[in-house]
Image (cartoon, rainbow, N blue to C red):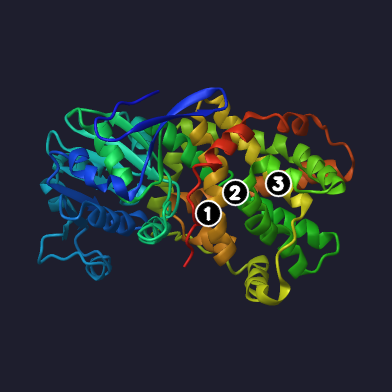
Amino acid sequence: MDFDTAVFDKEYVTLGDRREAIVRGGRHLFDRLPAAFEGVRQLGVIGWRSQGPAQAQNLRDSLGGAVKVVVGLRSGSGSFEPARTAGFSEQDGTLGEMFEVIAASDMVLLLISDAAQAEHYREIFAALRPGTTLGLSHGFLLGHLTDVGETFPADVDVIAVCPKGMGPSVRALYVQGASVNGAGINASFAVEQDVTGRAVDRALGWSVALGAPYTFQTTLKSEYLSDLSGERAMLLAGVHGIVESLYRRYRDHGMSDKDAFRHSVESVTGPISRIISKDGLVGLYQSLDDEAQGIFADAYSAVYPVGLELTAEIYDEVASGNEIRSVILAGKRFGRFPMGRIDQADMWQVGQRVRAERATDGEAPLDPFTAGVFCGIMMAQADVLLEQGHPYSEIANESVIEAVDSLNPYMHARGVAYMVDNCSTTARLGARKWAPRFDYLLTQRSYPAVDDKVVVPAPFAAFQDHVIHDVLKVCSQMRPSVDIFVE
């Protein structure tokens, strides 16, 4: 997999035993954006969800008027007012009804919800003019089209740019990047169809204009398989199930509610994530003393088989279309069965008190058992994606980097329950469906193996020489120079 660009400078990085092409971003490249967007007079950003506000504003600011950026919203949407507050307006033609904006735009970034894409794609495709470019920040729509036996229109480019972080961070770090070199969110890009011959440069221009310090290549199919699987495993559901199971375990072993929360949730979202972010998984292990390394190794070996089994099942469910169909069917039930919240459970109420008392309690403990559990599930996901042939950069991002650099800091600031209750509908459904499976199997199989001293050590033996350590070491050199922004 490789690409050619006439506008940007392509570089190669060696990740493990593979070489991957990347593009390095930066504000010094903004003067190349008119060339990247040649032929694009109007760029329509459709939707005002997490990514919509960030991408519309970043593109507008980066392009500086060279391309007109217009926000399109469904008629009657409550997002018109927030879009006006951000500087888009009907008066100057930068805000309008979504189908009118689609029809008038040379490049359309479709950032509405997955369910809305699945419901309205025929009308959206009908509004696209031949020779225009359709941009996505997630491959869900390709998965749905594959499931129903349909395809994208043959006469348009189809590209994707997928920031490895939440929309608010994409915007906040872009703003910070005006004065802090290297601030931004890395992204992957894909070209599904190239009708105009300009698809690669438009995708790369889009990523650079968003402020991505580095842009990696993938395919749209690979992106949605890894992304949907990841959020149902390590990125969201997995960590949710891990911390719930550990919280109960620590309470059952005599810890107070507060200490159980600190040794489970706070340990994961605090010191464990911070160390992995800078030093990798092996760096986390090496930071422990001899006794703690033994505890880590036992926990890792006990949970890795569970993580491998569940992540392989999740991947199969995504690849088969079952998970996408499940999301669409659930959306149709919302009128009768709206999605509830999880933040009223006892554990999350304890979490509110713990976060409020951090100033007096100090740093959360680096619990070696929690670290072993977390890394065991994380590595299992990486191995599933590795078995399925995903690029190393994608494996590292979807299994490790997005978790510790993007999502877990939000969980640390607001709570795991907050994240589960406030991310995309697709991710929220996945967390509710799969987190209990992680919780159950860890509690029923992994922890008893540790307690009964019947842990098979083979998984940890494989951990020490795993290729992901070298991959993460290279990726760490491409880590944004500032930490994720959390309001």
The CA distance from mark 2 to mark 1 is 12 Å
What residue sits 83% from the left and 41% below the top? Answer: 449
- Residue 284: mark in rendering: 3
Whether 61 is drawn above or below 149: the answer is: below
Across and down, in percent, residue 328 comes to: 39, 45
Across and down, in percent, residue 207 comes to: 33, 44
Q: Tag 1, which secondary structure?
A: helix
Q: Tag 2, which secondary structure?
A: helix
Is 42 situated left or right of 50 in this image? left
Residue 117 seen from this side: no
Label 2 environment density (alpha carbons within 10 Å; few <14, some 14–19, many ≥20): many
Whether 359 is drawn above or below 198: the answer is: below
The CA distance from mark 1 to mark 3 is 18 Å
Across and down, in percent, residue 252 comes to: 82, 60
What residue sits 57% from the left and 27% below the top? Answer: 16
Front in this rendered view, residue 151 or 404: 404
Label 3 environment density (alpha carbons within 10 Å; few <14, some 14–19, many ≥20): many
Give the mark toward the camera: 1 or 3: 3
- Residue 407: mark in rendering: 1
Disc 2 residue type (three-letter): Ser
The CA distance from mark 3 to mark 2 is 9 Å
Q: Tag 3, which secondary structure?
A: helix
Please identify the residue farthest to the right as the structure is shown: 452
Answer with mark 2 or mark 1, whichever residue precedes in sequence.
Answer: 2
